[in-house]
Image (tube, grey):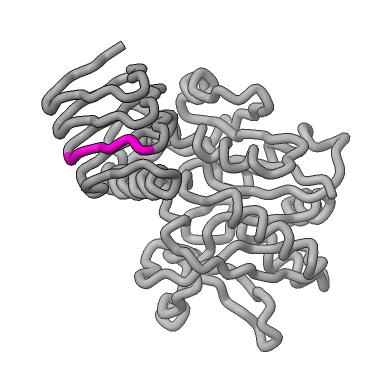
Amino acid sequence: MTLHAIILAAGKGTRMKSKKVKTIHDVAGIPVINKVINNLEELNISSMCIVVGFQSDDVLKTVTSTKVEFVTQKEQLGTGHAVIQTEENFKNKEGDIIILPGDAPLISAKTLNDFYLYHKKTDAHISVLSTSMPDPTGYGRIIRDKSDQVLKIVEQKDATEDERLVKEINTGIYCVSKSVLFQSLKSITTDNKQKEYYLTDIIQIAKNNGQSVYSYVANNYREFQGINSRKDLSDVSLYLYQLKNELLMNNGVTIIDPNTTYIEHNAIIDQDTIIYPGVYIKGHSIIGNNCVIGSNTYIENGIVPDNTVILPNQNIIA
């Protein structure tokens, strides 16, 4: 089984009110785009292609992985148009392609792997990763046919009143065989309110060609929160801090108050260390075994040996 990936990272992210493109903002100590790449690299990905556009040079400088190729979308004419730009990169490759947005760092490797296994099990031509959102406003809706296959995906701005009541949403993640993907993209148009080339239109095209389209419904809708605003950035960061704290506690670290403890992605903390409230551990900090980190302490790229006691209100910057 050969699996490739396309990451869509060409958008401006105007609602961020930032001079930086949204995919290079940090969440819990790691740029958004690098977190997406890290999650993909846990799968057996044969190749990875990132579509860049706005501030492409900054994205290229931010990406630390050496396993990716870059393609530029010079005009932002929609997600379908973005994927079309990658066709030359896949000219001599075969297999399936997973497509996902570059601003969704919470999607776990496990969810992506389960999705791919579902795609292979159903022998679908196209698989869509969906979830049920309590408030689906702003998301494309999954519309199913009588056999429970995906009939189409309707964007919020194009949806009827009845379609907007649907809770099952499109996460923007697809798995498609290479041949079906690029053949279907040849038929997409800009016949929609946004006058863009929607990637979602390949669903209807595939159905019209008698091809199967299935949807894998993921349980944890929190994984699919994208980043379109500063509030989204904060929400995603807090969720990642929560996951990091849970991971550390499961591995033998005591965190007195996880709600006020912020430990970044790359920090390493050994067993039997106790962390008091109000602590921020940043960068590539390494905290040894059986340490005590007092309240309201800030550690940046610090190395703390085993059995060290750090009193409250300290700043340690290496």
User: Does 163 sit above or below residue 130?
Assistant: below
In the rendered image, residue 60, in percent from the top left (x then y), is placed at 54, 21
Task: Confirm whether residue 300 shows in the render.
Answer: yes
In the rendered image, residue 126, in percent from the top left (x then y), is placed at 73, 62
Residue 275 located within the stretch drawn in magenta:
yes
For image coordinates 66% across by 60% down, the residue present is 115
User: Does 281 sit above or below residue 236?
Assistant: above
Identify the image quadrant of the C terminus.
Answer: top left
Foreground of the two, 182 or 35: 35
For image coordinates 36% across by 33% down, the residue present is 264
For the magenta stretch, what is the residue range? 272-277
Q: Quadrant of residue 287?
A: top left
Farthest residue to the top: give it.
318
Task: Confirm whether residue 21 shows in the render.
Answer: no
User: Does 147 sit above or below residue 47?
Assistant: below
Foreground of the two, 14 or 302: 302
User: Does 75 sit above or below residue 213?
Assistant: above
Farthest residue to the left: give it.
313
Residue 128 located within the stretch drawn in magenta:
no
For image coordinates 43% across by 46% down, the residue present is 247
Foreground of the two, 56 or 300: 300
For image coordinates 42% across by 30% down, the residue present is 268
